Image (tube, grey):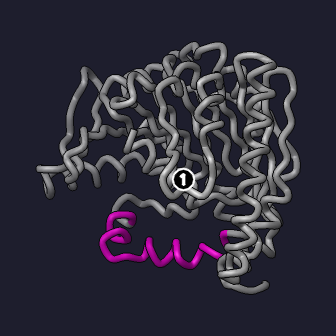
Amino acid sequence: MTRLTHLALGAVLLLGLGVPASSAATPDKLLPAETDTVVSINLRQIIDSDVIKKYALEQIKQAIEGQEAKALLNDLGLDPLKDIDRMVVATIDTSRENTKFLLIVHGSFDPDKLFKTAEAQSKKDSDRFAMVRDGNIVMFKYQPETGDPPLYGTVVNDNTVIAASEKKLIADALAAEKNGPAKLKPELTALLKKMDDKASMYAVSLVKGKFDDVQVPGGGNLPIDLSGIQKVLPSAETIAMTLKISVDVNLEVTFGMKDDEAATDMQNTVEELLKQLKPLAALAGAADERAKPLADILATVKTTAKNKDVIISGKIAGAAIAQMIRGGGE
């Protein structure tokens, strides 16, 4: 789960533009049949967004300009700000300690350069990089210095590269590219069809039974009571999230609960939590100029319960983003 968390956090740091028109998402054809969670990040829209251009693009460019990173990217023939369109992360939760994943990156690539650079790196740093074969498949293995399990990657074609936590997921993805997509779980397919493909980011997850023994922090010096969340989370069966950013940031999270009663309990719990957070946001705003928008942001959060779903939505105004970053207005 640690590697999945790092991937998710890295993705969230790049969140950007959403567009007004919507389009139903089409499941990526390389997704493994056993997939439980899908996170799709529209990097092309994000990099082109006003928010990233104003507040993050220069920092991103500076990070890429690092000597070692720039040299490797040049060897790969890759400009991540221009050549990468979308990233899709699929995970398979076999246990809390063992989450398998497949990362799919869509864009414009030069397969020859990618393979040659990876091969050269395997000769330069054989302790961490190696070329491996699985039948007729050529892939590259990367062993993290942290001691975490190895990662595997390969080029699918000039529009797609993939990386995974195990060789079988690479082989299955290549088979799907050749023979057609695997049949996903019906519940996951239904969730994906409700997503907006033009959103900056969307995520869907099957979570039935996964919160049964999750312990929510409580007691001690926590200023809010999370015991209600502890009670209602085990009744959640699905989670879906959509993030769009244009002038404002709009977030919507939907919990699919086991029944109508559980949905009502979840809505009431969230609303009680918001009541606890609002005075804390006011105090934070009084103490720090940058935190002043928090109260206004919480005021936009709305909850609705419809059938078995609980929908939580909220908005961050562009001016609020500027104040939180700069401590003042635009």
Looking at the image, residue 103 lies above or below residue 31? below
Nearest the viewer among 231 and 56 is 231
**What residue is shown at x 49% (from left), y 63% (from top)?**
79
Image quadrant of residue 142? top left
Q: Amino acid at mark 1?
A: Ala
Expressed as whole percent of the image width and height from the top left, the position of residue 167 reads 30, 28
**Foreground pick, 243 / 278:** 278
Q: Residue at the spot x=47%, y=38% of the render?
A: 157
- Residue 176, placed above or below residue 163: above
Tell which residue pokes out farthest to the front in this image. Answer: 220
Residue 33, given in percent of the width and then of the height, sits at 51, 17
Residue at image position (43%, 39%) is 162
> Where does the C terminus fall, quadrant-wise?
bottom right
Q: Is residue 4 above or below residue 122?
A: above
Q: Is residue 188 visible?
A: yes
Residue 319 is inside the magenta segment = no
| Residue closest to the eye, 156 or 304 | 304
Q: Which residues are magenta?
A: 52-73
Badge 1 density bin: few <14, some 14–19, many ≥20, Cα 10 Å:
some
Q: Which residue is mark 1?
A: 11
Q: x, y (%) of residue 214?
A: 48, 32
Q: Residue at x 55, y 40 (%)?
A: 88
Q: Is residue 38 left or right of residue 312?
A: left
Per the picture, the main secondary structure of the magenta-coloured stretch is helix
| Left or right for 196, reference 230 | right
Q: Is residue 25 visible?
A: no
The kind of secondary structure element at disc 1 is helix
Residue 55 is inside the magenta segment? yes
